[in-house]
Image (tube, rainbow, N blue to C red):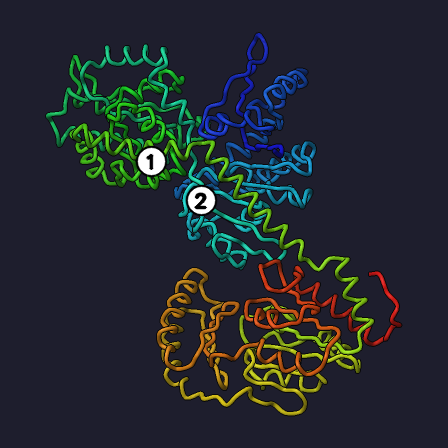
């Protein structure tokens, strides 16, 4: 098994400086608890900040490093200013509120951004010192979103996974961030990017399309020179630990204390960090409404509110703490009696025995965040219910709600709905509680934290395997050398060259992307050699191709194979009708009106709907709608619907680039054939070539072509070199590049 480097902002072990020396305690938090439960079973090293600033370590740095290394932990030391500006600053004043949709709290300060970037670079320096070629680097959470790209720049072939434990917001929210593009570029340095739910995956892919313009299909992102993947992996828990909690003697002791204090009253449990995203104020207000509407429960229920201190240096949290204190006091003052206090308020973190005891003893868990990446507390509560009794009321805004559909799911902003949910939970028949919980427990047992990690690692290996397969087909130095030697030895050579996206970049308007002088010179030199025959294959109309290339001694194929020029005149592949356009064009005009930025290009025997300039999300929806509609509309018209790069073209069936290219392939007995293209319309050409042909796909994408070439610049360089060889006509001896 390859070594695993886990990277996160905090180590699972926290260093605290006391008067009598350094103390090492376990960190709290979902990541440390979840990943910490299995990482030691791997050959692993955890890299992160130990929770103490470098100024406080003084001469004890070596001892801290030794103790942490004994725990398979490698510290990244940060200064007090780094922690203040990076962690308390950019992470918790910018990313945290923005990604949780609290845009009014987000601070956009360039100095905080610079600190965030600096700390990510510090992490990168530490990781690259320890990383080995076969290591797996697994980076966690929003504190380190620049890190994948920084590592990729230094270790281009290493396996990198990234997991975001908080929501990824919709593009309309994410676009508010001034450094949105840098964040996306940082994340795209990973091979696999994981999220808790598909909603977050969809939001991320939407931002990638809109900001970077990259193609995304089935979660795969094609950046041109790399392919990577984004997918959903709902994090699990240490199932065995919580399922067996009720058998723990310490837990049993704590349960007895709770029951002795509360008696036969029903327990509603709420456990969270003190955070404005958790909806604690709304939860208390909903409980207030519940008691107001259901007086029969007064004196018969206790609301246990546990809030762990969090980010006490951030002003919004100080204000929240004050408001929670006041609201708890108001509810207790409004409904409380001498022998009954409605709200038990515990402002502290609970050790495992006490936490589990509350889980086991509680009749209802009320987990209603306003926005939450996952929420493992909900899963832990359900898992402890070995007798099956207990009801979970959970917010639809929590990632865990997607897996816990048998719970009572509520809108946390709807106080009446939450209050009604509480009543339903408290009055639910025991048999129904058991049936619901057993279903959820089976699911949580199957997909525990170990399975979650394994699924992520398996998916990371799969995408790396795909990358290696595509990389193996790269036009390498050795392949290029063989190609040039074959080229020099050959006497009859055929070049089949796609135009848009291969020889020139795609342009937003069809009238753009006119060939530059450098390209025309390359084509002229290639075609002037008597051994060579050059053919440009394009989806453009014949008049445009004639205007651009008519002066050159080359063959032309227009409109994806409808028109052919092999000599001085243009020929049509077969007699075609175009009266069908009168039926199709109004339909396309309707979609153009409904999709701002799209437009229609009409050719002699085809019509093209372009949507490159349209809003990507809307364009994808409209394109899918249009394809479905056109397939039924053209069923009896002998027409085909051809999808290209941000275009949909309608033309006669049976007409394609491959069929047109066959005219040249069968023309002579070629001893050298070179074909190149960039999208799936070129696959028809690749599929009909003889075995000895060199077929090349531009960018790293799956293809029937034998080889891949990363970018247009490399295409130009290769053709320029072959053109030079044509012009200088070297001897038939072998050459090395």
Q: Which mark is residue 232?
A: 2
Q: Verify CB contact (< 8 Å) between mark 2 and mark 1.
A: no
- Left or right side of 409 for 731: right
The tag earlier along the polypeptide, 2 or 1, is: 2
Q: Which image quadrant for residue 356?
A: top left
Question: Quick one: label 1, few (<14), some, or many (20+) residues within 10 Å?
Answer: many
Q: Which image quadrant for residue 56?
A: top right
Q: What residue lies at 22% left-to-right and 14% top-to-bottom? A: 262
Which residue is tagged 1? 369
Mark 2 to mark 1 CA distance (whole Å): 20 Å
Q: Is 99 located above or below residue 123 in the figure?
A: below
Which quadrant of the rendered structure holds the N terminus? top right
- Left or right side of 117 for 286: left
- How far from the left and from the top, in percent, is residue 352? 40, 18
Q: Nearer the viewer, residue 555 or 10?
A: 555
Q: Is 643 located above or below residue 109 in the figure?
A: below
Q: What residue lies at 60% left-to-right and 68% top-to-bottom? A: 501
């Amino acid at each position: 098994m390859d070594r695993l480097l886990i990277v996160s902002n905090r180590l699972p072990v926290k260093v605290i400086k006391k008067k009598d020396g350094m103390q090492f305690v376990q960190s709290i938090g979902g990541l440390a608890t979840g990943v910490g439960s299995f990482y030691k079973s791997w050959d692993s090293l955890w890299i992160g900040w130990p929770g103490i600033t470098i100024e406080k370590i003084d001469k004890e740095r070596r001892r801290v490093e030794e103790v942490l290394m004994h725990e398979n932990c490698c510290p990244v030391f940060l200064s007090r200013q780094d922690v203040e500006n990076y962690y308390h600053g950019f992470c918790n004043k910018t990313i945290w509120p923005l990604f949780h949709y609290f845009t009014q709290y987000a601070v956009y300060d360039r100095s905080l951004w610079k600190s965030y970037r600096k700390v990510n670079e510090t992490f990168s320096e530490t990781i690259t010192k320890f990383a080995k070629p076969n290591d797996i680097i697994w980076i966690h959470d929003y504190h380190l979103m620049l890190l994948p790209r920084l590592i990729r720049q230094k270790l281009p072939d290493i396996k990198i996974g990234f997991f975001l434990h908080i929501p990824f917001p919709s593009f309309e929210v994410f676009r508010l961030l001034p450094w949105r593009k840098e964040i996306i570029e940082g994340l795209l340095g990973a091979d696999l990017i994981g999220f808790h739910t598909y909603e977050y995956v969809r939001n991320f892919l939407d931002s990638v399309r809109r900001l970077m313009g990259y193609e995304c299909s089935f979660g795969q992102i094609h950046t041109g020179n790399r392919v990577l993947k984004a997918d959903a992996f709902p994090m699990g828990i240490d199932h065995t630990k919580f399922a067996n909690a009720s058998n723990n003697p310490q837990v049993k002791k704590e349960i007895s204390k709770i029951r002795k204090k509360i008696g036969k009253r029903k327990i509603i449990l709420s456990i969270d960090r003190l955070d404005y995203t958790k909806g604690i104020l709304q939860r208390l207000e909903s409980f207030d409404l519940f008691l107001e509407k259901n007086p029969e429960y007064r004196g018969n229920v206790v609301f246990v509110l546990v809030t762990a201190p969090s980010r006490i240096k951030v002003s919004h949290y100080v204000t929240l703490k004050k408001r929670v204190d006041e609201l708890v006091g108001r509810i207790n003052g409004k409904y409380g009696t001498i022998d009954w206090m409605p709200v038990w308020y515990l402002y502290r973190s609970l050790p495992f025995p006490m936490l589990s005891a509350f889980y086991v003893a509680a009749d209802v868990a009320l987990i209603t965040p306003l926005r939450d990446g996952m929420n493992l507390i909900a899963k832990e509560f359900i898992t402890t219910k070995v007798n099956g009794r207990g009801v979970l009321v959970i917010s639809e805004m929590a990632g865990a709600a997607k897996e816990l559909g048998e719970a009572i799911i509520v809108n946390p902003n709807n106080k009446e709905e939450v209050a009604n949910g509480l009543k339903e939970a408290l009055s639910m028949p025991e048999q129904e509680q058991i049936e619901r919980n057993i279903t959820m427990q089976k699911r949580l047992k199957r997909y525990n934290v170990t399975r979650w990690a394994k699924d992520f690692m398996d998916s990371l290996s799969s995408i790396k395997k795909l990358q290696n397969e595509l990389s193996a087909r790269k036009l390498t130095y050795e392949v290029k050398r063989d190609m040039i030697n074959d080229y020099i030895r050959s006497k009859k050579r055929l070049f089949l060259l796609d135009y848009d996206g291969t020889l020139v970049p795609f342009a937003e308007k069809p009238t753009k992307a006119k060939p530059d002088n450098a390209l025309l010179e390359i084509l002229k030199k290639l075609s002037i050699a008597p051994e060579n025959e050059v053919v440009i294959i394009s989806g453009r109309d014949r008049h445009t191709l004639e205007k651009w290339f008519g002066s050159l001694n080359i063959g032309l194929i227009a409109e994806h194979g409808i028109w052919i020029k092999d000599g001085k005149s243009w020929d049509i592949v077969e007699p075609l009708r175009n009266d069908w356009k009168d039926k199709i064009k109004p339909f396309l005009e309707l979609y153009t009106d409904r999709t701002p930025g799209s437009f229609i290009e009409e050719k002699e025997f085809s019509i093209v709907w372009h949507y490159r300039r349209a809003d990507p999300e809307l364009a994808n929806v409209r394109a899918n709608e249009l394809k479905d509609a056109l397939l039924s509309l053209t069923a009896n018209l002998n027409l085909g619907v051809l999808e290209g790069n941000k275009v949909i073209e309608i033309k006669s069936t049976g007409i394609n680039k491959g069929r047109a290219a066959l005219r040249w392939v069968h023309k002579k007995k070629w001893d050298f054939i070179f074909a190149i293209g960039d999208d799936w319309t070129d696959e028809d050409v690749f599929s009909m070539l003889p075995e000895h042909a060199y077929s090349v796909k531009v960018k790293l994408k799956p293809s029937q072509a034998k080889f891949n070439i990363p970018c247009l610049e490399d295409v130009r360089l290769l053709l320029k070199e072959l053109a030079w060889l044509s012009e200088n006509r070297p001897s038939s001896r072998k050459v090395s590049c």
